[in-house]
Image: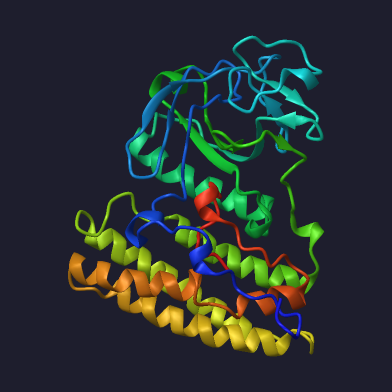
Amino acid sequence: MTGDDTPSPPDPGTSPRPAPQRYRRRYLTAGALAVVLAGAGAFAVLARGGGPQDQKAAANAAGTPMRYGACFTEPGHPGHDRSERTGPDAGPGITEVPCEQTHDGEVFGGLDIEPGPYPGEAELAGIAPRACLDALASYAMDPWELPGGVTYEYSYPLEEDWRAGARSVVCLFRAAPGADPLRGSLRRTADAFDVDQLAYLGEAGELGTALNLAPAEYADEDLAGNKEWAADVARELEEMAELLGSRRWPSGVSPAARSLAEEVERAAGAWRELSRAEDAEAFDATWEEASGLLSTGASGVYPLRERLGLTTDRPQVNGGSITPPEAL
């Protein structure tokens, strides 16, 4: 803390940072998937930077879909703890348990796809991340509150599952490999925040979603996709700067909001420049500055969060957090 009790930004040197061109690829990760759909077979699991992988999915003990917000254990998962199991032994499947118990995962969203011909893996692979990011933004509205040892997975049906009646994208929180099991629900929806907190978090959530939708390929392989992504981020930053600078905040919040608005405007300009890069070399040269203006340069986020009554502990992305390092 500083002398006026304003939280100080963490020293960037306290936690090793990966090369800037690499850490933006960490946001969407997927491990071994246990899908909670009745009769599920092979589902495609997407990992950032790689193509779909076929994995076997398991139904839960009752053979029925899990509830939105349900927590579950999965035998064989690294975080599994059999000592607190209350449901029947599901063998290779999964069992819903109270979220107050230690558990391996939590269902935070999904999407039912309209019946019809199989849309194809490419289309579903485009639908799944957006659907789950939208669900994430409303299920856990302040990503800074998420523990560092949490990852998430999303899945969609392969063609054989589609023929068997599977029509859902599924979104799950997971304890990261090597992390402690989860305990307690990660759910913090709109009813947990006041109107000013929601105004800020809603716009910050849109920015987080845009950051998380980084292309799978680097600029030297997909320059157009990376430039489009940078333009989307710049647009969200411009909208956030507008909110921070023009909204009628409480008197104790307004100065911090206006100060952060200036920093966000500078970041928006850098991301807009990134979106105009003429080639991959120029994109990579601009990337570090653009990302750094948010991850280590936006010091005004800490006093604003404090005055809004939000946590000021930035997630440590190198510890496995699913929160983008540039997230505000």
Q: Is residue 179 left or right of residue 22?
A: right
The answer to whether residue 326 is visible is no
Q: Nearer the viewer, residue 314 or 188?
A: 314
Give the total number of marks visible in the rendering: 0
What percent of the width, then of the height, locates residue 126? 40, 45
Q: Is residue 3 left or right of residue 34?
A: right
- Residue for point 68% across, 78% down: 304
- Residue for point 24% across, 73% down: 277
- Residue for point 37% across, 79% down: 270
Quadrant hosting residue 163 = top left
What percent of the width, then of the height, locates residue 306? 74, 74
What percent of the width, then of the height, locates residue 309? 78, 71
What percent of the width, then of the height, locates residue 48? 39, 44
Q: Nearer the viewer, residue 93 or 156?
A: 93
Task: In the rendered view, tell whether residue 103 sits above or below residue 122.
Answer: above
The answer to whether residue 325 is visible is yes
Q: Nearer the viewer, residue 150 or 165?
A: 150
Task: In the rendered view, tell whether residue 269 sits above or below residue 20.
Answer: below
